[in-house]
Image (cartoon, grey):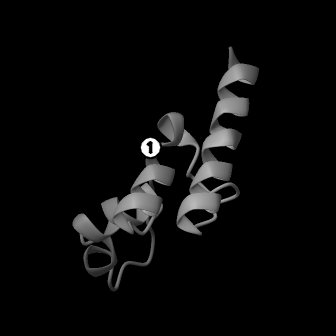
Amino acid sequence: MVATLDRALARYADIVARDLGIDVKDLPGAGAAGGLAAGLVAFLKAELQPGVDIVLEAARLRQRLAGADLVISG
């Protein structure tokens, strides 16, 4: 099943490149969730960001840690 999905996603990327002129084949994160991110980039001009960056910004972690000498996470 994985090999079939991989071939289908490669074909999808080829068609997107051919028809839209947007290369999503080697775009990091574009193959996750069956190519959803690739479709968002190709058709909606989305910009991919690592999820951790979004969470850290939403939690205002940089501001919360200002002045800290030690941070322990788990």
Q: Residue at x 39, y 59 (%)?
A: 43
Q: Residue at x 70, y 31 (%)?
A: 6
Which of 35/67 is in front? 35
Q: Residue at x 68, y 51 (%)?
A: 14
Name the residue furthest bottom.
67
Residue 17 quadrant: bottom right
* Left or right of residue 16, residue 37 in this image: left
Residue type indicated by callout 1: Leu
Whether residue 51 is situated above or below residue 63 in the rendered picture = above
Whether residue 69 is situated above or below residue 15 in the rendered picture = below
* Left or right of residue 70, residue 10 in this image: right
* Left or right of residue 34, residue 63 in this image: left
Q: Name the residue under label 1.
A: 36
Task: Give the structural element (helix, strand or loop) at label 1.
Answer: helix
The image shows residue 29 at horizontal and vertical percentages of: 57, 52
Q: Residue at x 45, y 70 (%)?
A: 70
The image shows residue 16 at horizontal and vertical percentages of: 57, 55
Name the residue furthest top.
1
The image shows residue 23 at horizontal and vertical percentages of: 64, 64
Residue 60 quadrant: bottom left
Is disc 1 surrounded by few (<14), some (14 to 19) or many (20+) residues within 10 Å? few
Residue 25 quadrant: bottom right
